[in-house]
Every structure is written in C-alpha cells, then in structure tokens.
Amino acid sequence: MATVHRVIEAVRTAPRRTTKRAALVALASLLLYAALRHLSHVSMVDAMVYQAEGGAVAHGHDLYQLRVGAYALPATYPPFSAMLFAPASLLSFGVLRVVVTLVNLVELAVVAALSCKLVGWPSRPLRPAAVILVTGCGVWLEPVWTTLRYGQINLLILALVLWDLTLPDSSRLKGVGIGLAAGLKVTPGFFVLYLLLTRRFRAAATAAASCAATVLVGLLVLPGASWDFWTKELYDTTRVGKEYIVDNQSLRGMMDRLLLSTHTGVSTLLLVAGVAVTGLALAVLIDRRCAGMPRAQAWSGLTVAFTMVLVSPISWTHHWVWCVPLLVLLGAEARDERRRARPGWAGHRWRLVLGATALCFCSFAMWFVPHRAWAGQVRLSYWFEPMASVYPLFGLAFLGLVAVRVVRRLRAEPVPAWETPQGRGASALGGRPRATARR
C-alpha cells in the first residue's frame, strides 16, 4: 500500500502539462501497437507453453515430456516456474492472452520506474512522465515487442533484478530479487558472481538462499521433475532450440553462423570466457574504483547484464529487454552532455550513441535475414552477418564503450594516498583513512 500511495503522490505532484502530453503520446503509441498486433495475428506461443506447464503441475503430468503446438515446444524452465504458471491452466487461452499482455505492460511500467530510479534521472517531478513515455513507446523495441508477441516473462525477470540493484547495500532484502529471478530462469544467477566480486557477501548469500528456496519448493512439490531438470534437462541446450538460428543473439549463435558450423566448441568457448571475464572485471572496476563516476551503479549493473546475455548459450532476441534501462541511462548521459554544451564531436557523442542504440533495438534487423539460413538449406553471404547478429555485435561494442570509460576515469582520478608506497606503510600502522569504506 505504501508503494501505491507513493505512486499516486508522485503523479499528483508532477507537472500536469508535461504529464498530460506524455500520456497522450503513450496512448497514441499503444493504440497503434494494438492495431498492428491485431493485424499480425500474434501467436503468444510461449504463453501457451506456460499454460501447459501449469496444467501439467495441476494434473500431475510429466512436466518435461510435454510438447506444445505445431513446433512441439517443451518445458524449459525450472519446476518452480511451472508451479507459478498453475493458475493459468484455469483460464481459456483467449482470456490468458489478454491477461498476459496487460501484465506485461504493467511490468514494462515497473521496469521503466526502476530504470529511472537506478539511473537517478529524470528528476522526481518529471519521472511520472518519463515512466509513461517509456511504457507507451517501449513496445516498439524489438525485445519488448517479441516479449509481448510470445507472452514471455522477460520483463518480470528484468524487474526483479532491477529492483535488487536499486536497493541499498544495507537492505536485508538485497539479493532476494536476484535469487528469485535465478530460481525462475537460472541465467540471472550470473549476478551472484557480481555480488561476490564486489564484496557484497551478505547480498550474495541472500541471493543464493533465495534461489535455493525456490529449488527446495520445487523438490518438495515436484521431486521427480526437479531431479530431471537439475541433473539432466538444464544442460541439454537442444531442448531450448537450435543455437545457429537468427533468433539466438548470443555469442554462441553468432559464432555458429559466422563459421557455418554447429561445432564451434573451442573457438566459442574461448570467446565466451574472454567476454565473461572482461565484462565482470569492468563491472567490478566501476564499482570499486569508479564510484565517483556519474551513475556508476547503473553502468556497473548493466555491464553485468549485457555480459550475461552475451555469454549465455542461448539468448533469444526477447532476452535483450535490458535495452530499456540502457536507453534510460544513455538518455541521462545525453541530457548532461546537452547541458555542458561542448563544441564539436565532444558535445554530441552521447546523443549519437543514444540514437544508434535506439536504432539497433528498433531495427528488427535479424528478422530480415531468411530464417532457415545456416541450417544447410541456405548459404548466405558474410554481408548478412551484421544483420543476423546485430545484438551480440552491439553487446561487444557496449563493453568496448564501457572499457573506454573505465580507462579514462582511472587515468583522470589521482591514486588514493593509501595506495601509494607511503600510504601502504601508513595503512600497515593502522593509518588507512575511513574514506575507503564502501561508498
């Protein structure tokens, strides 16, 4: 209730004209989206799978033997997720389509609000207008569009992790959101490594305990399915889908397409390992050495997020919903740049980066490539590679941008006194300043 009251108060005190204009733009965008969605006859096939998983739980059927739809899609999430889908089995699929769409739009609004909170932009009076605009216009981002098209749960996962990232380190709840997200879809467990490396040991333990609780609940309710998932199904990527198709925007998918092979094991493993280490190292450097950098927490968290989707064996296009908080972050950087009004290239860098990022995630580029390419039926020119792997290429470019920022920040900041030889000597005598405490 307290959260609802805060939302109502924020809307009530916001500038009326600005908020009203944002609402009109968002409404027009959503109406156009609804019309195109109706004309495109979206299948919401993943919502269909979730409903079947919930039905399997409710009726005691074998969860990981079910197959749904014309493509015989299997269950791929942990048993705990399937338990949460059980109420969906009580609804007709027509009603479920409406419910899932509305819930996803609400989750998009929550993601927008949490993104603004993480970034600390815009100011509180303008934040309701920003949330309304991101919700109304965010549906045109390909990862969001595809999430809505399939009826996916990516926005829920994103909201849980963002909520966790916005909590102060002193909060006893920090780690719960990441743990629950990992319990629902496994891959957010990558953030536990981040918590450990940044010495948030209590939060890491809380995340691990929260995830373990979801596993324990699954074991108690669905012991057979839990055993099958955690000992066998989790490691079988063929159940999720073919790695080489353009839907898969991970480094693994990019390498399979680039080398025209489904056996790129060593080369892909080396690339994935290098990117994982680099991404985590950059995130830790931002957190530990660049805490004075504007929006350091947001840059650090999103570096982990994009590293996660890059190194995951399969990252469908709708897994890249992390573009929503990234666009908010880049918008904040562009706003600061505009206020500084520097001449030449230096005064437009962030606006160009923001525009290029928005273009990338609104391009739907991979869907213009024949879907059966690299499967043996079609051999396309290498010129199609940038289109087929636009998200992993963007992810690598983003990590490069982060690396440049970190290097420049470290060069610009003077070495703290306690890190010099004289300072280390003083520290050994108990003279390390209290300012070294976590900021």
Image (tube, grey):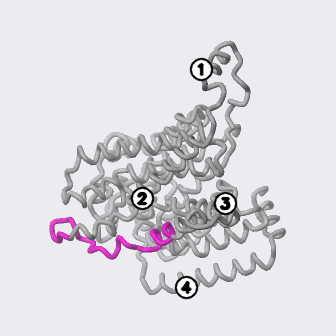
Q: CA distance from mark 2 to mark 1?
A: 61 Å
For the magenta stretch, what is the residue range?
Answer: 356-380
Callout 1 crowding tier (Cα within 10 Å): few <14, some 14–19, many ≥20? few
Q: CA distance from mark 4 to mark 3?
A: 25 Å
Residue under label 1: 421
Work out whether residue 435 can be spotted: yes
Residue 204 spot, x, y in % from top left:
56, 36
Question: Which of 13/241 is in front?
Answer: 13
Mark 1 secondary-structure assignment: helix
Residue 147 spot, x, y in % from top left:
47, 67
| In the image: residue 106, left or right of residue 122 | left
Work out whether residue 107 can be spotted: no
Residue at image coords 40%, 70%: 45
Residue 379 located within the stretch drawn in magenta = yes
Find out whether the residues at labels 1 and 3 contact each other: C-beta distance under 8 Å: no
Residue under label 4: 32
Q: Quadrant of the N terminus?
A: bottom right
Find out whether the residues at labels 2 and 1 contact each other: C-beta distance under 8 Å: no
Find out whether the residues at labels 4 and 2 contact each other: C-beta distance under 8 Å: no
Callout 2 crowding tier (Cα within 10 Å): few <14, some 14–19, many ≥20? many
Residue 53 in the image: above or below residue 96? above
Q: CA distance from mark 4 to mark 1?
A: 64 Å
Compare marks 1 and 3 and give the one earlier in the sequence: 3
Callout 4 crowding tier (Cα within 10 Å): few <14, some 14–19, many ≥20? few
- Dividing the picture into quadrants, the one containing residue 173 is top right
Residue under label 3: 116
